[in-house]
């Protein structure tokens, strides 16, 4: 199972993820498998264009738990 080691390098949510990808600061993208496609489509495009590693997490609830937030999360990134 995936584990986040440094929460200072974590950004959660579509806006923060998009911003980090546009600034080319991302080491890895985390995407919840059950997230809506219209939410994750642009994130996938940006990550693919920048050749960033993408890892799928089982659910939004699980990704939220991994990020230590009380709600589900569709996307998150780990900063370089």
Image (cartoon, rainbow, N blue to C red):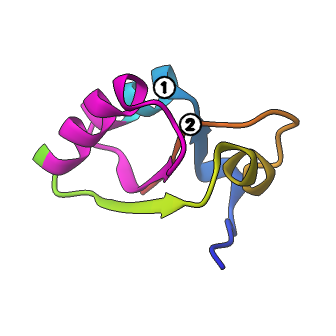
Rendered residue at 73%/37% (across/down)? 72
Seen as rendered, the residue at the extreme left is 49
Residue 49 percent coordinates (x, y): 11, 45
Q: Is residue 38 above or below residue 21?
A: above
Rendered residue at 88%/36% (across/down)? 70
> Where, by quadrant of the figure, is residue 40 drawn?
top left
The answer to whether residue 71 is magenta is: no
Numbered tag placed on residue 63 in the rendering:
none
Seen as rendered, the residue at the extreme right is 70
Q: Residues within 10 Å of mark 1 (few under 14, many from 20)?
A: some
The local secondary structure at tag 1 comes to helix
Left of 36 or right of it: where is 27?
A: left
Question: What is the spatial separation of the Cα atoms under label 1 and label 2, in whole angstroms?
Answer: 7 Å
Residue under label 1, please give it: 14
Residue 24 percent coordinates (x, y): 26, 41
Left of 59 or right of it: where is 19?
A: left
Rendered residue at 19%/37% (across/down)? 45
Left of 24 or right of it: where is 56?
A: right
Q: Choose between 52 and 38: the one closer to the eye.
A: 38
Rendered residue at 27%/28% (across/down)? 42
The local secondary structure at tag 2 comes to loop
Residue 55 percent coordinates (x, y): 43, 63
* Mark 1 touches mark 2? (CB < 8 Å): yes
Write down the region rendered in magenta.
21-48
Q: Is residue 26 visible?
A: yes
Q: Choose between 43 and 34: the one closer to the eye.
A: 34
Q: Is residue 58 above or below residue 41?
A: below
Q: How many labels sit on residues? A: 2
Residue under label 2, please give it: 74
Closer to us: mark 1 or mark 2?
Answer: 2
């Amino acid at each position: 199972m995936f584990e986040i080691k440094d929460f200072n390098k974590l950004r959660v949510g579509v806006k923060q993820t998009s911003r980090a990808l546009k600034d080319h600061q991302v080491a890895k993208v985390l995407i919840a498998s059950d997230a809506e496609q219209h939410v994750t489509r642009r994130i996938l495009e940006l990550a693919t264009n920048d050749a960033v590693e993408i890892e799928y997490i089982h659910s939004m609830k699980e990704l939220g738990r991994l990020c230590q937030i009380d709600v589900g999360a569709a996307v998150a990134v780990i900063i370089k």
